[in-house]
Image (cartoon, rainbow, N blue to C red):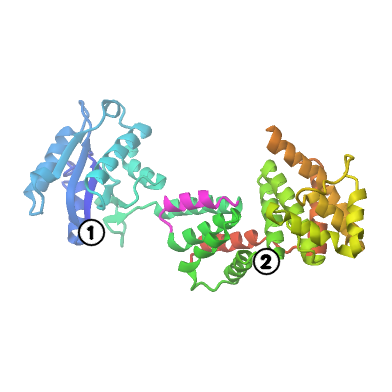
Amino acid sequence: MSSVFLSFVGQQDPVSDKTREDGSIVSLIRHLLTEGQTIDHVFLLFTRGEKGTQERAELTKAWLLEEDWPFLAHSITLQAVEEALSQDPINQLLAVQVARQAVIMMQQQYSGASLELNGSSGTPAMKSAWSILQATGDVRHGRVWQVRNPADMQLGQARVFRNDVNALKNEFDSQVIQQQIKDYNYSGAGVTLQASNLDQAILLALLQSGFYRLSFDFDRAFNCLEGVAHLTQPELANWRQDLSALRQKDPKAILKEIYFNGLIRLRNQRYADFLVSVFQLQEQLLDYLVNHRLGLNVSGERSQTALSWQRINQVDQGKLRQYLKTYRLPKGGALDLDNGISRYVLLAIVEYDAQLAALVPHLKDLNRYCELRNRLVHGAEGVSAIADEAQLLTTLHKLMKQVVGTPTLNPFDRFNQQLCEWLQGGQS
């Protein structure tokens, strides 16, 4: 792969006046060429002024051109840094800003080329600027190098060696991504992952699957797994099974999904969205009890209204119909038996059946939260906390336990644990 060489110019370039040893620029370029690296361009930054390095930069260019190296005059650029850095060459912020501009320019001019960054020339601020840019992700394809002073070398040490901070950056990126995963922020984790140097293909597919599942787009969530079908981790197998059931609209699977999704919204303090989940859960619970437990096969769709009422009227030779006529709503008034099948009609049907009597108090407890949700939706009200949160969670847990069985560990939490383990220990 071709590369571009970037460096500040120091007082020891191209050759040290004291030791007569090659400076870091010449030493590093010689090392790279010896290793078979192709260098398309050398970009050197110098300071102006009485103590500046402009003369050193010009000497370095002349030295490079005199060597038997594949450089032409137009492939070596000397550029003065901003006046502010020339006047204050130990200013870290200014050094990083100048280095970033050079990196951006070279990345645009030589798209796809690797950057070879010399961390051994210039002031300490200039030397460290390249590592800082690598740590912040501004250098996606590049290497930071150090050149040792020959007088300070120990036995067995190489004169030129890489000093990348990619490992440290990867650690930081991994920690950020893990926290985003624990917060169920799969979209944000995907963005962070793509801006990192971490292995991406498998994790991106799984993060996208998590995002789509959390959005109730089960088909897309399942399709994201096509490229990772070879993975055999138990949690991923469970994840696939869950998605298969959800795609088939298994009623118990849907109930569990709404329940766990709601808990995630509550944990992330998305209270308005949590109340929407409570509303959805009550509706789906009532629908499940009436249509699957009692087998009435009624629907809230307008096109099915007449047929649904016909089926209701036939239950117990019309006794259910009579019960519904006398039923009173929580705030008073009667049910509307001439229009669609509302959740209050379904609740009354559940209350009519003695086998489901134990569920009725819990279902009614949800009503005030459902009414709060309606006020939020229709009245543009806000909510920053859930009153009697612990009691509500207990109610939801009891309903789920009695209708679909005791809820197990949230599948998203198991999924998150698997992803974090991969980030911590490497993918397999």
User: Residue 208: horizontal and vertical position, in percent?
Assistant: 51, 57
Report the predominant secondary structure element of the magenta stretch: helix
Taking the spot 22% from the left edge, 39% from the top edge, the residue there is 9
In this picture, residue 24 sits left or right of residue 193: left
Residue highlighted by disc 1: 1
Q: Who is closer to the viewer here, 415 or 340?
A: 340
Residue type at the position of mark 2: Asp
What type is the residue that disc 1 sits on?
Met
**Pointer 1 local density, CA inside 10 Å: few below 14, some 14–19, many at least 20:** few
Query: Which of marks 2 and 1 precedes in the sequence?
Result: 1
Q: Are marks 1 and 2 in contact (CB under 8 Å)?
A: no
> Is residue 197 rendered magenta in the image?
yes
**Helix, strand or loop under label 1:** loop
Q: Quadrant of residue 132?
A: top left
In-front residue for pair 60/232: 232
Q: Which residues are magenta?
A: 184-198
Q: Residue under circle 2?
A: 250
